[in-house]
Image: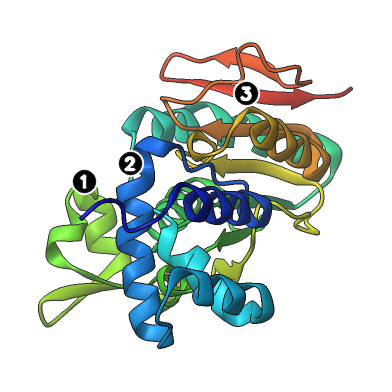
């Protein structure tokens, strides 16, 4: 039957996705794009990919839904244990001491590309256990997927999703409900969820920690550099950046400093 998308159609849609989100679709991802497009055409009532493309150019809400459909929402609680060990044993103790010296009492954290919320809630649990009660913790969690954000805000997860949660956190920060668990209100209240496209400035400032893991792997080199530069601008003078284990800033002209801890490799911004 041939391709569902002609070469011109594929290039047109790939460019639209890239221009609007920074996500890069290579020819090897064509079948993924085709399957997502078929579903969106059915829901939008469009007969052809050409007609649907015109809809996307004219309807910003449909464009949001389309970008949502092409994103990948793969996550879990305490994903990459070594990152959370670094957070617990190095980053939080370091920042708590730094804040005390500076007479500051707020820790600001951004979980960028938070998917269905497992990452920011994991961060919140570690913070709740470690950060002194007189120090405020503000966690902003954002994603391109409105569907994922709705799940995250609800804070309910099937039992199978709780695999990897340490028992001490499961007892303290989850309440069993039917076939799953709710995140407790004291943890939910630490996180503010918001829609954000990393292609654009976030408006956030003086962040102490940024988590953006397994996101820029979907961007090409130019889009990766643009995102990393935006992170630099949003972060405080003494701050830390976590990216995915399969991601690296090596070879990128960036001001971040590579940091190897006893548990994982991360990046930091230190301006004295």
Mark 2, Cα crowd under 10 Å, few <14 / some 14-19 / many 20+, is some
Does dot 3 land on a helix, a strand or a loop? strand
Q: How far apart are labels 3 and 1 at the CA level?
A: 25 Å
Whether residue 22 is visible: yes
Along the line of sight, the residue nearer the viewer: 69 or 149: 69
| Residue found at the far bottom of this picture | 45
Q: Is residue 216 left or right of residue 74?
A: right
Give the x, y percent position of residue 123.
47, 50
Q: In this view, does 110 lie to the left or right of 38?
A: right
Q: How far apart are labels 2 and 1 at the CA level?
A: 8 Å
Q: Tell us which disc is closer to us: 3 or 1.
A: 3
Q: Badge 2 is on which residue? A: 79
Q: Is residue 30 left or right of residue 243?
A: left
Q: Is residue 160 left or right of residue 238?
A: left
Question: Mark 3 near mark 1, Cβ–Cβ under 8 Å?
Answer: no
The C terminus, quarter of image: top right
Q: How far apart are labels 3 and 2 at the CA level?
A: 18 Å
Q: Tell me which label, 3 or 1, sits earlier in the chain.
A: 1
Q: Badge 3 is on which residue? A: 267
Name the residue at 68% across, 25% down: 268
């Amino acid at each position: 039957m041939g391709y569902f998308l002609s070469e011109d159609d594929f290039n047109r849609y790939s460019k639209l996705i890239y221009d609007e989100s920074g996500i890069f679709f290579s020819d090897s991802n064509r079948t993924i794009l085709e399957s997502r497009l078929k579903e969106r055409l059915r829901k939008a009532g469009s007969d052809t990919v050409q007609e649907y493309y015109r809809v996307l150019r004219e309807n910003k809400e449909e464009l949001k839904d389309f970008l949502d459909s092409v994103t990948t929402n793969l996550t879990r609680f305490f994903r990459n244990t070594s990152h959370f060990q670094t957070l617990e044993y190095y980053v939080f103790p370091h920042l708590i001491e730094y804040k005390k010296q500076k007479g500051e009492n707020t820790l600001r954290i951004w979980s960028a590309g938070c998917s269905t919320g497992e990452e920011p809630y994991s961060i919140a649990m570690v913070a709740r256990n470690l950060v002194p009660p007189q120090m405020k913790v503000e966690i902003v969690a954002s994603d391109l997927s409105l569907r994922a954000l709705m799940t995250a805000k609800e804070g309910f997860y099937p039992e199978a999703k709780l695999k990897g949660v340490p028992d001490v956190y499961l007892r303290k920060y989850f309440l069993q409900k039917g076939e799953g668990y709710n995140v407790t209100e004291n943890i939910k209240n630490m996180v503010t969820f918001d829609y954000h496209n990393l292609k654009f400035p976030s408006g956030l400032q003086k962040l102490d920690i940024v988590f953006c893991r397994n996101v820029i792997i979907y961007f090409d080199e130019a889009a990766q550099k643009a995102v990393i530069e935006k992170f630099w601008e949003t972060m405080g003078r003494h701050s830390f950046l976590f990216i995915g284990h399969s991601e690296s800033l090596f070879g990128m002209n960036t001001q971040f400093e590579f940091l190897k801890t006893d548990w994982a490799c991360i990046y930091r911004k230190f301006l004295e």
